[in-house]
């Protein structure tokens, strides 16, 4: 059973930028995307009411779900300070959920923050699944920065901190969805 502690907020600034972008998307009627909370059972609470120790009551699915112009999407936000994304940051239940989501006609992906390079990428589920299978069969246990498609670089633009819809559109056009 996983425990939450002060390390539980890793990636929170990345997610906050996604949240602010999602708010603008909603205000402009481009998409409705919601952050999916992970249920935490508090074990210890400090004198100001903050959870200092807790455990996850159940496995989460992905960080975000919603609809973009009639297209259901789900994605997980991952962040790394390295030159690669460790596969240990991705969990089997997330792969299963994303796979089932795509079977139902949705689009699943990762948004990856390479903090070392200050770059964000859209990473399609089909690519993730391929790397996942390799890792599960004894192969490489990470996805190198160099293997991310530079055409799927997510940029900041005006009031969109992480303008992933623009990159999603590029992916859809290039893959003839």
Image (tube, rainbow, N blue to C red):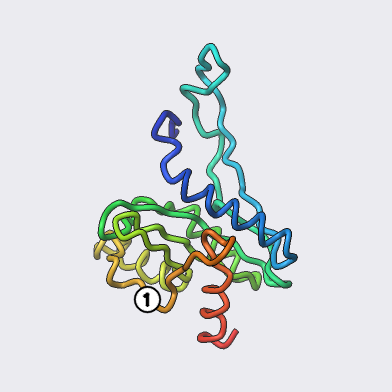
Tell me the residue at 55%/51% (across/down): 63
Q: Residues within 10 Å of mark 1 (few under 14, many from 20)?
A: few
Q: Quadrant of residue 90?
A: bottom left
Q: Secondary structure at mark 1?
A: helix
Relative depth, front residue between 92 and 116: 116
Total labels: the figure holds 1
Q: Compared with residue 115, is residue 39 higher up or lower down, i.e. above or below?
A: above
**What percent of the width, then of the height, locates residue 8?**
44, 36
**What percent of the width, then of the height, locates residue 153?**
42, 71
Name, please, the residue furthest toward the top: 47
Relative depth, front residue between 77 and 159: 159
Tell me the residue at 56%/85% (across/down): 173
Tell me the residue at 56%/81% (across/down): 172
Q: Quadrant of residue 150?
A: bottom left
Q: Compared with residue 99, is residue 57 higher up or lower down, i.e. above or below?
A: above
> In the picture, which quadrant includes the N terminus?
top left
Residue under numbered circle 1: 150
Tell me the residue at 25%/60% (across/down): 83
**What percent of the width, then of the height, locates residue 58?**
56, 38
Q: Compared with residue 40, is residue 38 higher up or lower down, i.e. above or below?
A: below
**What percent of the width, then of the height, locates residue 143?**
31, 64
Left or right: residue 66 versus residue 99 is: right
> In the picture, which quadrant includes the C terminus?
bottom right
């Amino acid at each position: 059973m996983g425990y939450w502690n002060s390390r539980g907020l890793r990636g929170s600034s990345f997610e906050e930028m996604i949240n602010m972008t999602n708010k603008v998307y909603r205000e402009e009627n481009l998409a409705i995307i919601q952050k999916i909370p992970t249920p935490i059972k508090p074990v210890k609470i400090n004198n100001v009411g903050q959870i200092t120790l807790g455990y996850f009551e159940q496995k989460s699915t992905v960080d975000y779900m919603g609809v973009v112009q009639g297209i259901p999407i789900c994605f997980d936000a991952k962040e790394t300070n390295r030159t690669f994304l460790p596969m240990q940051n991705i969990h089997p239940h997330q792969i299963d959920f994303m796979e089932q989501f795509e079977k139902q006609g949705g689009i699943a992906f990762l948004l990856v923050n390479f903090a070392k390079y200050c770059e964000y990428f859209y990473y399609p589920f089909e690519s993730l699944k391929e790397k996942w299978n390799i890792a599960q069969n004894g192969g490489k246990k990470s996805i190198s920065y160099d293997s991310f498609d530079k055409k799927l670089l997510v940029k900041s633009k005006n009031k969109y901190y992480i303008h992933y819809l623009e990159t999603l559109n590029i992916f859809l056009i290039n893959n003839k969805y």
